[in-house]
Image: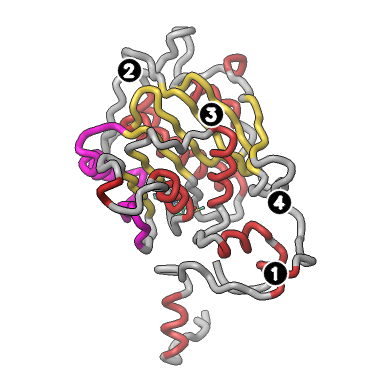
Amino acid sequence: MGKNSKDKRDLYYRKAKEQGYRARSAFKLLQLNEHFHFLNKDLNRVVDLCAAPGSWSQVLSRKLFEDCDTVDKCNNNKKIVAVDLQPMSPIPNVITLQADITHPKTLAKIMSLFGGEKADFVCSDGAPDVTGLHDLDEYVQQQLILAALQLTTCILRKGGTFVAKIFRGRDIDLLYSQLGMLFDKVLCCKPRSSRGTSVESFVVCLNYNPPADWEPKLDLNCSVQDFFQNLHSDAAASKCFTDIKPDQRYIADFISCGGLNSFDSDATYDNIEENSKSLNPIQMPTNPPYKRALELKKQGKLGKTVV
Ligand code: SAM
């Protein structure tokens, strides 16, 4: 998040800087929470997957530790763990882990941070680097969601909540059906701060309730397919997670979050007086991909390779 004319074009980008959030995505979680109120004071253990640069973790920290200005006043059981491949600058009340959510060791690390206790809430705003090859991007995104779901099934307590970013592609009904085998209620939600022109949405999965005879177990040598292999829904024994027939798929209810009086993320608000001055970014990127290029440029070593 830099300092430029985007302040005028994108009100959420501007508001994020005004309110001290590292990214505009903070408003997506806030608007989802406005509707569902899942970030309440009863939450003790929370996991933020794919968390960098950390605006969702900032929201979680502010919500969970709202009234604790001193450590004594805080419930010592509250813990937020944020995981990302990228390093993250520290956030108050958040333990940051630089790790890959697809690796079983990451689950073990989170479990040990929670002292073996399960989490009440898991969220994932994961997005892989896009290649521009639409089918490949959609496939990789799907795999990332399934990886987040795998980890969630191992760490979430019964009755817990899972929120994840999805891209509504061709086979999204398959994912809704799969989630429906694990949670009592699955909803597809679009916060006002998520651009209407984007296929991005969020699944809000309430009341984790896996089949009683299914034991999730993460293992390095086990594929996503193997992991969910023995998961059959109670309601229809013929419904298997890895082989849901087209007629068994369903479309989740769609909910727009954030209210009509909140800002429209596709509109330009350049007539608002206070927008005329650009604000500094809240947090400089810790390890941006252009860092090496800048270093080489300084040393006069940045040149084009002639083939
Ligand atoms: N929710 C974040 C916020 O509010 O600041 C923004 C998340 S950003 C859209 C997506 C993140 O997913 C990136 O930081 C990326 O490094 C992370 N990511 C992608 N694949 C990952 C993986 N396998 N393990 C951990 N993080 C991953």
**Rendering coords of residue 241 (x, y %):** 45, 21
CB within 8 Å, label 4 to label 1: no
Q: CA distance from mark 1 to mark 2?
A: 55 Å
Q: Indicate which disc, 3 or 1, sits on the residue closer to the N terminus.
A: 3
32 horizontally vs 67: left or right: right
Residue at 60% across, 19% down? 246
Query: Under 8 Å from ligand 1: the CB of mark 3?
Result: no
Q: Earlier in the sequence, mark 2 or mark 4?
A: 2
242 and 264: which is toward the camera: 264
Residue at image point 46% right, 43% down: 124
| Residue type highlighted by circle 4 | Phe
Q: Toward which corner of the image does residue 225 lie, by quadrant? A: top left
Q: Which residues are magenta?
A: 90-118
Asked if disc 1 and disc 2 are in contact, CB closer than 8 Å, the reply is no
Q: Position of residue 49 (x, y in %)?
A: 40, 45
Marked residue nearer the N-terminal end (3 or 4): 3
Asked if 247 appears above or below 279 in the picture, the reply is above
Using a 10 Å C-alpha cutoff, classify the residue at mark 4 as few (fewer than 14 neighbours), some (14 to 19) or many (20 or more).
some
Residue 95 in the image: above or below residue 32: below
Residue 264 is left or right of residue 83, and the answer is: right
Q: Which numbered disc, 3 or 1, marks the residue closer to the eye?
A: 1
User: Mark number for residue 214?
Assistant: 2
Would you name the residue on which mark 1 appears? 274
Residue 188 appears in view: yes
Disc on the earlier residue, 3 or 2 = 3
Res. 186 image quadrant: top right
- According to the picture, the residue beneath numbered tag 4 turns out to be 263
Residue 109: image location, x then y, percent: 24, 44
Q: CA distance from mark 2 to mark 4?
A: 44 Å
Q: CA distance from mark 4 to mark 1?
A: 15 Å
Residue beneath label 3, please? 175
